[in-house]
Amino acid sequence: MGSVLVDAESPRKADVVLVLGGEWSGRRVLKGAELVREGFAPRLVISSGPLFYGRSESEMAAEFAVSQGFDRASMICVPWTNNSTNDEARTVSPMLRKMGVHSVLLVTNPSHTGRAARLFRRVAPDLEFHPVAAPDPKWCGGRWWTQRECEKTWFYEAIKTVTNPFGI
């Protein structure tokens, strides 16, 4: 049942790497920065949701990546104020078009790759989205039923996947 949620690909060349907001451990931004460093794309777009103590998640993520040895010059921070992946797709996709982007490596947690890819592809069918999974210990390598935190990860993403088409 967990594989229904996952739609992750191996990295490939793209115009940008897009790191989705909503993950505060830094694993997504580090995966995205690693993909840029490895030459899969020249730029890293870091998306974020609501402000935390007056600061955007994307700026804090960029600072974290720099503290881990990644180059700030390749990073573009995109702050926005909503908190759903659907809103994120509607906010970020027009900006990607303005940048002349055609192909995107979409970095998120494994359990989120399927829903995120569907939403971005629906909102921007003219762009090519290739989901890449960042490490997530709360996914248990796909064996989500083996630990309570992993079960919760599966449950929350499954609920979002089922309710999303209804706008919930």
Image: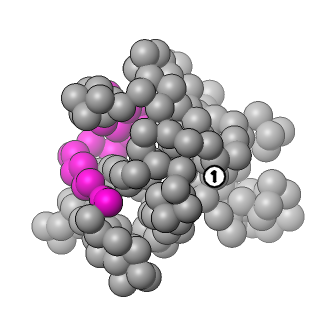
**Range of magenta residues:** 74-92
Q: Residues within 10 Å of mark 1 (few under 14, many from 20)?
A: many
Give the side of residue 30 with respect to residue 48, left or right: right
Query: Is residue 154 visible to us here?
Result: yes
Q: Quadrant of residue 136?
A: bottom right
In this view, the residue in front, 2 or 21, is: 21
In this view, the residue in front, 92 or 40, is: 40
Q: Which residue is mark 1?
A: 133
Which residue ends up furthest to the left in the rendered image? 54
Which quadrant is the C terminus positioned in? top left
Q: Residue at x 18, y 67 (%)?
A: 55
Q: Residue at x 29, y 29 (%)?
A: 100
In this view, the residue in front, 120 or 129, is: 129
Which quadrant is the N terminus positioned in? top right
In this view, the residue in front, 135 or 144, is: 135
The spot of residue 70 in percent (x, y) is 40, 74
The spot of residue 123 in percent (x, y) is 40, 20
Residue type at mark 1: give it. Ala
Q: Secondary structure at mark 1?
A: strand
- In this rendering, the answer to whether 21 lies above or below 159 is below
Q: Residue at x 22, y 51 (%)?
A: 79
